[in-house]
Image: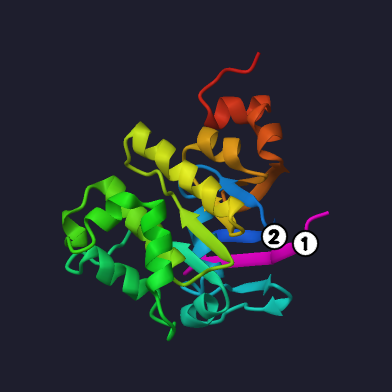
Amino acid sequence: MSEIMLQVKDLFVSYGGIEAVKCISFDVPKGQIVTLIGANGAGKSTTLKTIAGVVKPKSASIVFEGNDITGKTPDFIVKNGITLVPEGRRVFPNLTVKENLIMGAYLRKDNLDSDFEYVYGLFPRLKERSWQLAGTLSGGEQQMLAVARALMSRPKLIMMDEPSLGLAPIVVKSIFDIIKQINKEGITVLLIEQNANMALQCADTAYVLETGNITMTGTGAELLSDDRIKEAYLGKKAN
């Protein structure tokens, strides 16, 4: 049985009087790709932002590698090995590609040369455009930069919020190939994705989040073959 890297228990998040996440619990085993799928407004992004320290929970227990990180600041979370690739890329448009990468390593004091070599190996296009302003990159290139920037902190767990959003199919395939590659190299992945088909194909473990509640769980393959998932998320009619 896989060691649990991240344990989220009884997570409850509200914005004013609106309950965004209603007491959900799930585990992220070390070394796996874990995905949360669900419709817009289900609470997926809020869940990631809460783990990352960007949103404060009303109540929760969030434990990472045996340490309680509930309500900790984002810099504390990053320093301890969790990074978030936000929805919409959120690159710094007026900084170059290389400067964006340096921003991803802002808590580090050591030499970054091997890290540049690593992310440029994953994303050769970024090396070609290292001195280009990030705001002038294509959507796909900006997504590559957002992932590469997150990797510059040397995370143990990388969380990705809608990495395929607004991208052409060929670029989506490339992004998912990279997700699988960095996972094979030892980084655990927690993924939120509207493209349920792609997410479930690469996921070891999957959870379905609906209106703030987890309603189903299983392996990616199990949920891919489930008639309810086919009809609700894959656009296929159940037999």
Q: Is residue 158 above or below residue 206?
A: below
Q: Is residue 110 above or below residue 25?
A: below
| CB under 8 Å between discs 2 and 1 | yes
Kind of element beneath mark 1: loop
Kind of element beneath mark 2: loop
For the residue carrying disc 2, how many other residues have a C-alpha within 10 Å: few (<14), some (14-19), or many (20+)?
some
The residue lying toward the viewer, choosing from 113 and 187, is 113
Residue stretch rendered in magenta on the structure: 1-17
Q: Is residue 2 above or below residue 168?
A: below
Q: Residue visible at 36% across and 58% down?
A: 120
Q: Residue visible at 78% across and 56% down?
A: 2
Which amino acid type corresponds to the residue marked 2 in the rendered image?
Lys
Asked if residue 220 can be seen in this view, the reply is yes
In this image, 98 relative to 51: left or right? left
The residue positioned farthest toward the top in the image shown: 239
Provide residue 53's location: percent of width, then percent of height. Answer: 51, 74
The residue lying toward the viewer, choosing from 235 and 181, is 181
Provide residue 27's location: percent of width, then percent of height. Answer: 71, 58
Q: Residue visible at 51% across and 24% down?
A: 235
Mark closest to the chain's N terminus, 2 or 1: 1
How is colour applied across the structure in the image?
rainbow
Location of residue 130 (image quadrant): bottom left
Quarter that holds the C terminus: top right
Find residue 30 and name its label. 2
Magenta span: chief secondary structure: strand
Q: Is residue 4 magenta?
A: yes
Q: Which residue is mark 1?
A: 3
